[in-house]
Image (cartoon, rainbow, N blue to C red):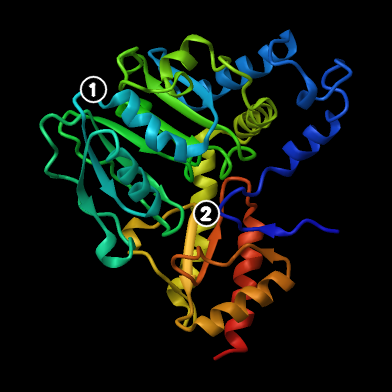
Amino acid sequence: MARVYNFSAGPAVLPEEVLKEAAAEMLDYKGTGMSVMEMSHRSKAYQEIIDEAEADLRDLMNIPDNYKVLFLQGGASQQFAMIPMNLMKNGVADYIVTGQWAKKAYQEAQKYGKANAVASSADKTFSYIPDCSDLPISEDADYVYICENNTIYGTKYHTLPNTKGKILVSDVSSCFLSEPVDVTKYGMIYGGVQKNIGPAGVVIAIIREDLITEDVLPGTPTMLQYKIHADNGSMYNTPPCYGIYICGKVFKWLKKMGGLEAMKAHNEKKAKILYDYLDESKLFKGTVRKEDRSLMNVPFVTGSEELDAEFVKAAKAAGFENLKGHRTVGGMRASIYNAMPIEGVEKLVEFMKAFEASHT
């Protein structure tokens, strides 16, 4: 069967080239006579895989030497607890709530200290990013937290908040490596890899060294301490070996594609094709305020739930998978991550035009 155009929000489409390489190495990785799935994480061959993955990621993102790169498990959702456990030294943190994942992080943080929602876009179903230029940042806040790209709602911070000198912690799960980023603007930047980088099961955390200390909340489990993972090179326990191996291949693919500047241009071109059509369509409408649109996740609706359902069904039959919107918002959503080819977006728009013509 031919490959479909997979618009899933995550786990999501991976570069075909990477999948073919992994398939070729499935039974014998570089003459070891075994798959990476079967290999000891304490072996020389695996140490090279994880070291190279980190080196390539540092190269791609220009990560300064005073930041640690950690390959962790538990997804972004486990970080919702791990962040306050490790970083809430004063017991206070400010959260900007721009969607379901920021809201969940904010609610989780309330278990560990005083979490303040200093801004929110809940009033308009998270369809915009609030003005973050002059927020009531708490004087004793340990950090300010954002979810930079909101997968469900299709919004993106195009300007980082003014944190008034407090460190910024950002969940970049759904925009990871989609464009260049200045790591020095963050105390911590992290994300699950299953949207733009690899298979589910790995979360990458990039944390400034001075924030990684033994001074954590009482009762913090050993496995939830950044210092434990940093001191052990992400090898305190068995890491998600195969997932990290695929991430490493994706980093190499990104470098080959020209790095993050090239990916940004590629992603802007793709997103423009879809947004331009949505802006002129009589049937389909985008749901996000124009200046806050994401390059990665594009939600849209017809205005009729029945018609939305009909469209999703027809699209699936035509080879466009996973276009149904998140259960909390309905409608449709096209996730067009790095590995989605431009051709996939062009063909989707062609299909949408034909559907519109037959329904208006």
| Image point (79%, 23%), residue name | 38
**174 or 216, which lies in front?**
216
State the quadrant of the C terminus: bottom right
Q: Is residue 126 left or right of residue 295?
A: left
| Looking at the image, residue 313 lies above or below residue 107 | below
- Report helix, strand or loop for mark 2: helix
| Image point (50%, 72%), residue name | 331
Residue 235 location (% of width, % of height): 58, 15
| Looking at the image, residue 342 lies above or below residue 242 | below
Q: Is residue 268 left or right of residue 146?
A: right
- Amino acid at the residue labelled 1: Lys
| Image point (63%, 18%), residue name | 50
Which circle's residue, 2 or 1, is located before the other in the chain? Answer: 1
- Amino acid at the residue labelled 2: Lys
The CA distance from mark 2 to mark 1 is 43 Å
* Residue furthest front in the image: 219
**150 or 277, which lies in front?**
150
Residue 73 location (% of width, % of height): 55, 30
Residue 42 found in image quarter: top right
Residue where numbered disc 2 is placed? 269
Local packing at callout 1 (Cα closer than 10 Å; few below 14, some 14-19, many 20+) is some
| Looking at the image, residue 324 lies above or below residue 66 | below
Residue where numbered disc 1 is placed? 89
Residue 147 location (% of width, % of height): 36, 44
